[in-house]
């Protein structure tokens, strides 16, 4: 059996060749990572779109059986898990809608706060930036339009433009300009124009009162304040 020839100087990599290889690997990584990150964010956006569309469908079904009104938004402020189970919140959207589709109501997470933020929960958003101590309270990444209290859907002149659900800003997320400023109690189960957030690379999702959902590329509030596109307060 012939022996393999030893590596000679002619076969060895030079420093220049090694640097070239490292540069090429770095360039390829630089091209690949953003593409992978973008694909992951697109997946999260699609998942959130489905969640909000499902909430909209459930809300419309609820309204059909409840004189045309959607469920309430629940108590004020960020809610503790024990508060979600109080009788005053029994008819809030987060307690009445999920069970209609086989999901747990928010009140059921009182004994298991971590479950509220699991992927099997209707309330969890993979793209949301939750507080580090999130299990201390129930932080909602989605919310119902706070201007729909006691409004009958059949009375809406423009249901296809009236917001029903939307991405709701959390404490660690940046609001859309020009509203700016610090807001307390972020993470409430209700949303409006100033609490709306675009967490999918400049895109945020709104479900409307006719049941359809749209992704808005709104790096400013121009689109979501345009009543020809989104109506937040149908009483005005």
Image (tube, rainbow, N blue to C red):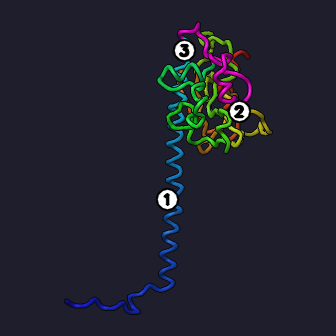
Of mark 1 and mark 2, the one earlier in the sequence is 1
Q: Earlier in the sequence, mark 2 or mark 3?
A: 3
93 or 216: nearer the viewer? 93
Q: Nearer the viewer, residue 216 or 167?
A: 167
Label 2 and label 3: CA atoms lie apart by: 25 Å
Residues marked 1 and 2 touching at CB (< 8 Å): no
Disc 3 on helix, strand or loop? helix
Picture residue at 38% right of the left edge, 92% below the top: 8
For residue 87, which numbered disc appears in the image?
none
Image location of residue 228, percent across then percent down = 65, 25
Q: State the quadrant of the N terminus.
A: bottom left
Q: Which mark is residue 62?
A: 3
Identify the image quadrant of residue 233: top right
Q: Main secondary structure of the magenta part?
A: loop
Query: Which residue is at a point 68% across and 16% down the rendered structure image?
Result: 88
Quadrant of the rendering where the C terminus is positioned = top right
The residue where tag 1 is placed is: 32
Residue 68 vertical placement versus 117 (above, below) = above
Estimate how packed mark 2 is, as few (under 14), some (14 to 19) or many (20 or more) residues with alpha carbons within 10 Å: many
Which residue in the protein does label 2 denote? 195
Q: Is residue 176 left or right of residue 8?
A: right
Residue 206 occupies which quadrant of the picture? top right
Q: Position of residue 92 (x, y in %)?
A: 63, 19
Which residues, given as a range, are shown in magenta?
A: 64-91
């Amino acid at each position: 059996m012939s022996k393999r020839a030893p590596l000679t100087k002619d076969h060895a990599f030079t420093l220049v060749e090694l640097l070239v290889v490292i540069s090429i690997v770095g360039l390829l990584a630089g091209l690949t990572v953003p593409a992978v990150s973008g694909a992951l964010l697109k997946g999260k956006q699609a998942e959130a779109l489905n969640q909000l569309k499902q909430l909209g469908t459930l809300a419309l079904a609820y309204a059909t059986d409840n004189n045309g009104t959607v469920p309430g938004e629940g108590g004020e402020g960020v809610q503790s898990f024990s508060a979600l189970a109080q009788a005053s919140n029994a008819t809030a959207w987060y307690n009445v809608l999920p069970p209609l589709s086989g999901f747990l109501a928010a009140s059921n997470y009182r004994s298991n706060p971590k479950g509220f933020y699991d992927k099997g929960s209707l309330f969890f958003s993979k793209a949301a930036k939750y507080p580090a101590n999130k299990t201390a309270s129930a932080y909602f990444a989605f919310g119902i339009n706070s201007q729909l209290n006691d409004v009958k859907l059949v009375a809406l002149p423009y249901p296809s433009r009236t917001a029903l659900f939307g991405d709701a800003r959390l404490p660690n997320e940046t609001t859309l300009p020009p509203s700016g400023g610090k807001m307390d109690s972020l993470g409430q189960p209700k949303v409006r124009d100033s609490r709306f957030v675009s967490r999918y690379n400049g895109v945020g999702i709104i479900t409307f009162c006719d049941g359809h959902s749209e992704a808005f590329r709104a790096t400013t509030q121009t689109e979501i304040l345009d009543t020809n596109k989104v109506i937040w307060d149908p009483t005005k």
